[in-house]
Amino acid sequence: MTVLTPLEIEALALSLRVGFASVIVSLPFGLGIAWLLARREFPGKILLDGIVHLPLVLPPVVVGFALLVAFGRQGVIGAWLYEVFGITFAFNWKGAALASAVMGFPLMVRAMRLSLELVDRRLEAAARTLGAGSARVYLTVTLPLMAPGILTGVILAFARSISEFGATITFVSNIPGETSTLPLALYALTQVPGGEPAAWRLALLSVLLAMAALIASEIVARRLGRRLRGIA
Amino acid sequence: MIEVDVEKRLGAFRLAARFAAPETGITALFGRSGAGKTTLVNMLAGLTRPDRGRIALNGAVLFSTEQRIDLPPERRHLGYVFQEGRLFPHYSVRGNLTYGTPRKGGAAAIPFEAVVALLGLAALLDRRPGDLSGGEKQRVAIGRALLAQPRLLLMDEPLAALDAPRKAEILPFIERLRDELHIPIIYVTHAMEEIVRLADTLVLLSEGQVAAVGTVEELTSRLDLRPLTGRYEAGAVIRATIAGHDVTYGLSELAFPGGRLRVSHLALPLGMPVRARIRARDVALAATRPTAISIRNIFPARILEIAPDRGALVDVRLDIGTAEHPVVLWSRITARAARELGIEVGRDVYALVKTVALDRRSLGRHDPGDSGSDGEDSI
């Protein structure tokens, strides 16, 4: 690869790794919360809804600070995680992924919840009369029918992740090779004299990455749409 | 035996239905929209939970508040054909058909190939639900329910969403389920023509209550059930057998105890038991046997009952059968004609039925295997 400099490759690879990790880890939680919010009535539902959506309305710095307090090496949860499992989020790429996941979570849940609310429950009832238990109904009817919403949620969360800046820099700082994703590397370049041409290249790279993700999702969404309308 | 005794309150609507039906043949749940038919079927399927009651199928309890039993739908083993098909859009026709087929167990009682052949699905297997016609969708839905190997098939107005030609396309298939697979069916409908053609037992529902249970012939001959069986469409259903075909004039003759009914040609073999619905407004009365008249169906009749209808009309219940086998017919005439003719209970008159009033929709094949067959043996 002669087109990209080692620094660019490093930032791009890190962004992709953080993006994929945050989406994959938050996917099951997203599906679970979407199901709770769309299908269940329980006390505190409004509160849960509010907490899930907080990162959307809070300044990202506040989220980063909260993560630092909770998941830092000395944090309430962070200390326990380190003691019991030896996992730490402090100042490494896992922390960046966690920050991205939290920031992208409301977008993911919203899309999934909307699509779940649109799933025709009469089809689920039909599946049950055909002998399918709740788990099989979920896997064979509910999930496939909400696939467009899952896809949208995943793309939005991924896009949020590769553009994440404030929460990440507050939580895990800007460490090259560890937490310096594309936006953070770009920010670092704008802070040094003469870094502008390199910053331009990173900006262009970010645009290409975002476009690729959007086009890929559009292609998949079209295929899914045809399939779910029962034609292709 | 299908035993149902359930209660449920839904807002201002209260459903309290109790009936027992044989687990052979087709039992029709008949009533206006809003009578609680679909709610009742959903309770049978386990999709709606009654507040109180008991549902049992051949002694196996599906629901009982007393015994604290409430089997989930997937463990009731009932097939359900919904009004709108409800095919899975993301599966092919084949995938839909096999969705409910039990994974384990030996040879299926209702094999895949048999259902495909019975419902004419071979050409559709690799298609997707989105590009099927309404009639095709409903055939696939029936096949899908059958292949789940149900103990009982529930059909909730399976023809209501279809136009007349599509209905005519599906009806023979449902007749074949009854006659060839011998699967018991609960059939919800508000169309009398489907009942005449298909049903053996009729459960009349009205405002959440069971108004009457009995054979189609019995319930349609009762004047007190007129408001439920339909005023305009009111009429009696009689059992007969195909006794002859008149090729020259394109007519068929149906024999019943007491006479022969001429109808438009029916492509059915001689001796085949059938049912004919004769609407009250298609039957005229005469005090003496008319001559030089175009009507070919003239039967001596005895007046059994006279019931005033709304306004200027009366419904007259007649017997056109024999002493051993009464055959009940209704006639709707004006009150003025009734008085001028001297219509009164016990009097002998003649009933006139126009052949053209009996179209294919009024005639149904009738399963000879059930209790009413002795009536036909005497012909």
Image (cartoon, coloured by chain):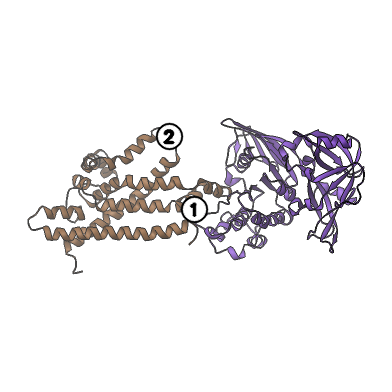
Q: Residues within 10 Å of mark 1 (few under 14, many from 20)?
A: some
Q: Is circle 2 on the same chain as circle 1? A: yes
Q: Is residue B188 visible?
A: yes
Question: Depth check: B127 or A135 in front?
Answer: B127
Q: Residue furthest bottom?
A: A2
Question: On the picture, is A167 further left or further right than B367?
Answer: left
Query: Hue of chain A?
Result: brown
Question: On the picture, is A156 further left or further right than A146?
Answer: left
Q: Which label number is shown at residue B248? A: none
Lower position in the chain sequence, tag 2 or tag 1:
2
* Place of residue B260 in the rendered image (x, y in percent of width and height, measured from the top left): 88, 52
Query: Separation of disc 2 and disc 1 at Cα?
Result: 26 Å
Question: Depth check: A21 or B256 in front?
Answer: B256
**In the rendered structure, which amino acid carries the disc numbered 2?**
Phe
Which residue is label 1 attached to?
A140
Q: Residues within 10 Å of mark 2 (few under 14, many from 20)?
A: few
Helix, strand or loop status at disc 2? loop
Helix, strand or loop status at disc 1? helix
Which residue is label 2 attached to?
A42
Q: How many marks?
A: 2
User: Residue B269 falls in which quadrant of the image?
Assistant: bottom right
User: Residue B219 falls in which quadrant of the image?
Assistant: top right
Chain letter of the purple region: B
